[in-house]
Amino acid sequence: MSVTVKILVLVLAIGGALVYRNVSQLWGDLPAPKLDTQQWWGDAAQPKDYAAYLANNSEVIGNRLSYPEKTITDLSARLNRTLRLTPPLEGVAFEYGFNTNYLKEVVEYWRDDYLPRWREREVFLWQFNHFTTDIQGLRMHFLHLMVYDDNKVGKHHYPVLLLHGWPGSVREFYDLIHLLHQSNLDKNNKYIFDVIVPSLPGYGWSEGTSRTGLGPAQVAVIMSNLMARLGYNKYFIQGGDWGSIIGNHMATLFPDNVLGYHSNMCTNMSPKSQVIGALAGFWPSLFVPSGFEDFFFPKSRALAYLIEESGYFHLQATKPDTIGAALTDNPVGLAAYILEKFSTWTNPSYRSLADGGITKRYKMDTLLDNVMIYYLTNSITTSQRLYAEAYSKEQRGLQLDRVPTRVPTGCARFKSDIMHFLDIQLKDKFPNLIHSTYHKQGGHFAALEVPKVLHKDFLEFVQKVEQKFKVKPL
């Protein structure tokens, strides 16, 4: 071998090594970061004796939601003001956002039908046990339903943590809670659950922080501490939207506590996943079960839809307080901003309907329950800040998408959701992806829209976890 060839081989070897190292640095697996499980988010100074703080502030308090008549009367007066809304363009339904002609109808129903029945709706929201407790300086709200011993007989009994997203709330899960908890015992269903449903920090009745840095990873720590506070060392997680991301982080950071992670919006945003997804577009049939190609392809359509529907995302990730100020004390604007998502994220074809198809899949009372939670708790700004914190330099620096999540994972895809990821993308993040399903009916708010379908899917996942990982009920 000549000297020239030897030099060339050496150069190629060194170059190859450098390329491999750079590629590995870009998309190789990373170890889980260590997060401070005592990080303080309260307004007061962090206690010097954290053990004493826990001893004195670990009480779980039952709460009954109630608002004075003055608050409801004031809201009714606000809704009774003359609306100076700009009419929609000719022939435009929901393509430009919430149709203002239909918005007038929503406001009228809210003011004249829903609000006079508010005490009835309040009782409906009280049907589950509401609690609060102090976690890392924040007053956290949650629903908690425990199974009576007599109801456990002959059943497989587990705890499950349900995590909502934006612009949702605990209200999304009410029908699913009944199914999981078996409010009406079903002799043909052998699975029964203790159900824990927290309001995320800054959402609903959970306190928001006045400090920067409370991103999804830190919320995952708070949720883990909440479950420990309630005495649960092993549990399942189910979530969509932010609940999916936070649940993912919990499974990644606290794998010993999570029996299984089930999501109706599984994602993997790692660089490697993005490359795999792009390449898969050239040979769709190799990566998608027959009959479900339109969940993912053509990529151009999926990308166009994502761009059309992500305007809110960029705003909330960069200027959450600006849009928050516009929506605070503005019930009509708040309703339009929130309810528009329950149109287009449920089914993109609903944009062509004058009423946005909002009541095709949901009852108006249900949707207004959710709007009322945001309005009465004044939580629209604090809820939106989660977007800005999620895309901060510090949060992105954790690179949690590159940390393998080895907890048993189940992914349920609903056709009209905002985005979908292929199994080959997900398995890079979730090596124990043991459950992957496709549902032609349903969108982003699956727990609210198709609770029975989501419940069945979740039970199938739990059964697979039992079989493959020899998990035993409580």
Image (cartoon, rainbow, N blue to C red):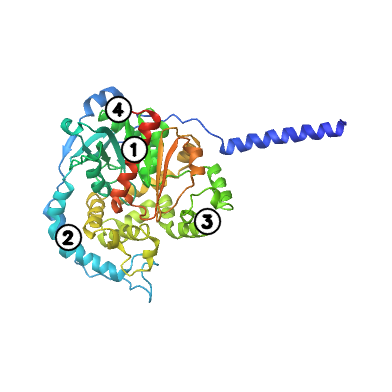
Q: Which residue is rendered at x = 27% and y = 40% of the image?
A: 198
Q: What element carries label 3?
A: helix
Mark 3 belongs to which amino acid?
Answer: Lys
Task: List the residue tagged with mark 1.
Answer: 237
Q: In which quarter of the image is the C terminus?
A: top left
- Cα gap from disc 4 to disc 2, whole angstroms: 45 Å
Residue 209 visible in rendering: no
Examine the image and state in which quarter residue 226 appears: top left
Would you place residue 131 above or below residue 81 in this image?
A: above
Residue at 70% across / 35% down in the picture? 16
- 346 displayed left or right of 76: right
Q: Which of marks 2 and 3 is nearer the N terminus?
A: 2
Query: Looking at the picture, which amino acid does disc 1 mark?
Result: Ile
Q: Is residue 283 left or right of residue 444?
A: right
Q: Is mark 1 on a helix, strand or loop?
A: strand
At label 4, counting other C-alpha atoms closer than 10 Å, the crowd grade (few under 14, some 14-19, many 20 or more) is: few
Identify the mark at residue 114; answer none if there is no mark: 2
Q: How many labels does the image show?
A: 4
Please tell me which residue lies in front, 306 or 424: 424
Give the residue number, with chain letter if any, for mark 4: 47
Badge 3 density bin: few <14, some 14–19, many ≥20, Cα 10 Å: some
Q: From mark 2 to mark 3, how far is it between C-alphas?
A: 42 Å
CB under 8 Å between callouts 1 and 3?
A: no
| Mark seen at residue 299 | 3
- Helix or strand or loop: what does disc 2 sit on? helix
Residue 384 place in picture, x, y as percent: 35, 49
Q: Could you say where residue 442 lies in the image, as x and y percent from the top left?
A: 35, 55
